[in-house]
Amino acid sequence: MEIEEMVSKILELIKEKKIREIKKELANLEEIDIAEVMNELPLDANLLLVFRLLDKDMSTEIFANLDSEEQEYIINSITYKEISTIIEDLFTDDAVDMLEEMPATVVKRVLKNATPDTRNLINQFLKYPDSSAGSVMTSEFVDLKSNMTVSEAVNHLRKVAKDKETIYTCYVTDKTRILEGVVSIRDMLLANSDDLLKDIMEKDIISAHTLDDQEAVAQDFAKYDLIALPVLDNEERLVGIITIDDIVDVMTEEATEDIMKMNAIVPTEDPYLKTSVFKIAKSRIVWLMILMFTSIISGIILDSFENAISALPFLVVFIPMLMDSGGNAGSQASTTIIRGLATNEITLKDCLKVAWKEIRVALMVGVVLCAFMTLRIIIQYGLINPVEDTVVPIRLVLSVTGAMLATITAAKLVGSLLPMLAKKVHLDPAIVAAPMLTTIVDATALTIFFLLVKLMYQI
Amino acid sequence: MEIEEMVSKILELIKEKKIREIKKELANLEEIDIAEVMNELPLDANLLLVFRLLDKDMSTEIFANLDSEEQEYIINSITYKEISTIIEDLFTDDAVDMLEEMPATVVKRVLKNATPDTRNLINQFLKYPDSSAGSVMTSEFVDLKSNMTVSEAVNHLRKVAKDKETIYTCYVTDKTRILEGVVSIRDMLLANSDDLLKDIMEKDIISAHTLDDQEAVAQDFAKYDLIALPVLDNEERLVGIITIDDIVDVMTEEATEDIMKMNAIVPTEDPYLKTSVFKIAKSRIVWLMILMFTSIISGIILDSFENAISALPFLVVFIPMLMDSGGNAGSQASTTIIRGLATNEITLKDCLKVAWKEIRVALMVGVVLCAFMTLRIIIQYGLINPVEDTVVPIRLVLSVTGAMLATITAAKLVGSLLPMLAKKVHLDPAIVAAPMLTTIVDATALTIFFLLVKLMYQI
């Protein structure tokens, strides 16, 4: 709402050439909000105008928060000197995030205007694989030496604070850049000004390596309540730090990815509203195709019972209920387990505990569902069944409830164990669950139902 | 793994009465890891023994990270004096989290041993509703005055740093506790030591109110890259702060809750492995019952087409495929939109854009699926159909593909718009989607399929 109003206000002011007014409006906004307003502006000279009106102190931070279309447009429109200012000013992680989305020509244009040091650093950071700790770290950390006193360290901090992503946790390294300790501002405040860092620093350090998975890193942040984490290369040298704000983004991204995988979508990081219809269709068609083909299996099973269906066509009425209940029961179990694995609450060695628990849960919910099914059948078909000649439609009740109980149990077991099996063989638990589950559960439901029917009705 | 080994090692050492060895082992662990080890110990005198061996500096922090069974056992086993030490030492948020899980008698035992100030504070905090900003905030913030100089502020910080949850962001309040500004340690480092806080503090403050939803607060943290946020009461007085470590937990919790709701589970915060079978069954049965009854609708629809099924029983083969494809297509759309709404990427005013996008996606994936369906029918039934007498089984193809296209489109539309409608009427988008979707999609698929069949085969 507010953003939209601001966008039209700004466009209005541009039309009226009230430049000073625009500056005043922008001054009232947080940097992130200015970026959001700019993301809604059309990609034309007005965007550039607003960008150039920004306070120099804030413009790089705002630039870092623009969408990539806006970043690309600005990079292509400004002078080499302006590019150089931005790229030197950007934190390495923001620079890398930006360049990863740009076409090669733009990347070239940017790197050409960076200093050799910056260019080397960016090139090195660009090499870290997607979703690795290296891909989310930044190089702007505070680097101290163990023989500094606290007051020397604080003086150093004063000088560099402006250009560092965080100053609250500082890193003590030796001459070869090996990480020796971590010292927080809190530690320094509580120490005497002539204490040596080596005496107050924490030497038991929680760290990550550049190739570690970002999801594992996020779990460490959550577990140890970290606000920053040092990242080491293969030779244990400190190459960067990861800060909590990036981990918050990683957590959102990973949750979205899991949710998409659990619901048969090939995950993408593209924002929905800005992604083309073709790309969205592509991310969805794969699993729809796979699932369509696997559901043919259920069709074939039904086909093999054509005789029973011809003889007793009213049985078909129970198919949706069995399939839906089984599917839901299974996805309840798989959801619980996938999430438990993702948050590290459940581990593979809990496998038997999980199976035993799910069997009991299945029997408990199964019995309740069966009781209501029986009631429903009696209400619908009366105490004396048109097809059968018994007091209650006992054969129908036994077929339906038997199939229901077996389906729910199979669904809960498969739903809970499949994700664990996937993890065991190093597949993503989220991806195998829903689709395979539907197929297995449907096939089980139909087979058991019609086998029971055949047995009960002797056909 | 490591935790399990440590647990058996500790139990072994207890048996051998090697107390000093236990202390040495514990000293090598992070506080959180000690808590994890203790959570795995049996609830007996040994747990108490380990608790009393802990370093006094760390014992409260470790206590705060224990599971509630362990906390309860310890509270019930230690002296009043020890209880009093713990409760005075705990951060308010941790104390409240603990007491919320305890039986009334234990709460009484704890509060009786707290000072009146602490007791009042805890009682006040216990009143904030679940999932509100008040329920995740803590009272241990640094409170400064605007006429302090930077060096006075730093001296004050030195005195209080030990007992504050964060000292990196400090809060400037007036005599009536109204929040006037925020000043970070970074700001103070960059200022001169005789600058007044009122001149360097940030006066545009991002804050929350006690009754704000924790999910909205988490979104602010993510958007503005915060590490702490002040919380105000109705009179705009500062009553607490929320720190990023608690927001990380809120994010995990909210994602889990959404995932559960999307998969027809009544969400609980209880850890799966420690929850009873009955409680798990209870959290799952509700939706299974609702879904079982709604799937009766599909059954009734099938029932009304009994004639068609009797005449052409092979048609039943296509039912699972239509139902499964529709269900999957719908949940893809609903997942995308629910997640987009949760991360604020999609808002209600995008409703038309979303519908138009989903229609095009549906047609695109629908056409591909139909092409493959046609191929499949030709392969299975040959170019000349046993029932029909045409060159291709054209009537079957038209019935199946027509139903498929309509089902996919309906599924995508309903799947995307239902969560938005829910949000519009202030229901949780996650909860309405999956269950209602299945029913609507199944009913649509079956109705259209059999209507087309009747039309094509003139029955």
Image (cartoon, coloured by chain):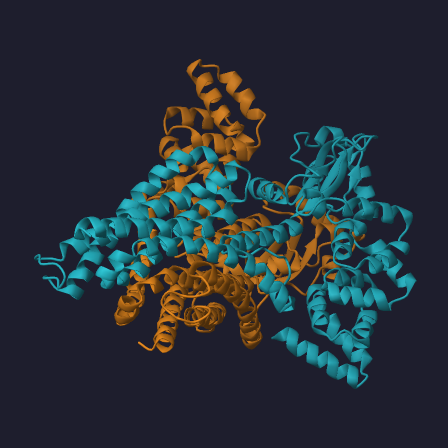
Chain colours: A cyan, B orange
Q: Is residue A455 left or right of residue A119?
A: left
Residue at image position (79%, 75%) is: A44
Rendering quarter of residue B105? top left
Q: Is residue B93 left or right of residue A303?
A: right
Give the quadrant of the N terminus of chain A.
bottom right
Counting from the top left corner in percent of width and height, residue B439 is at: 36, 66
Counting from the top left corner in percent of width and height, residue B253 is at: 49, 51
Quick one: B138 or B274, which is closer to the camera? B274
Say if residue B271 shows up in the picture: no
For residue A405, above or below residue A6: above
Quick one: A346 or A192, which is closer to the camera? A346
Q: Is residue A61 left or right of residue A245?
A: right
Residue at image position (73%, 28%) is: A199
Say if residue A286 shows up in the picture: yes
Q: Residue furthest top?
A: B16
Quick one: A24 or A186, which is closer to the camera? A24
Residue at image position (39%, 31%) is: B79
Rendering quarter of residue B180? bottom right
Counting from the top left corner in percent of width and height, residue A265 is at: 54, 57
| Number of on-image labels | 0
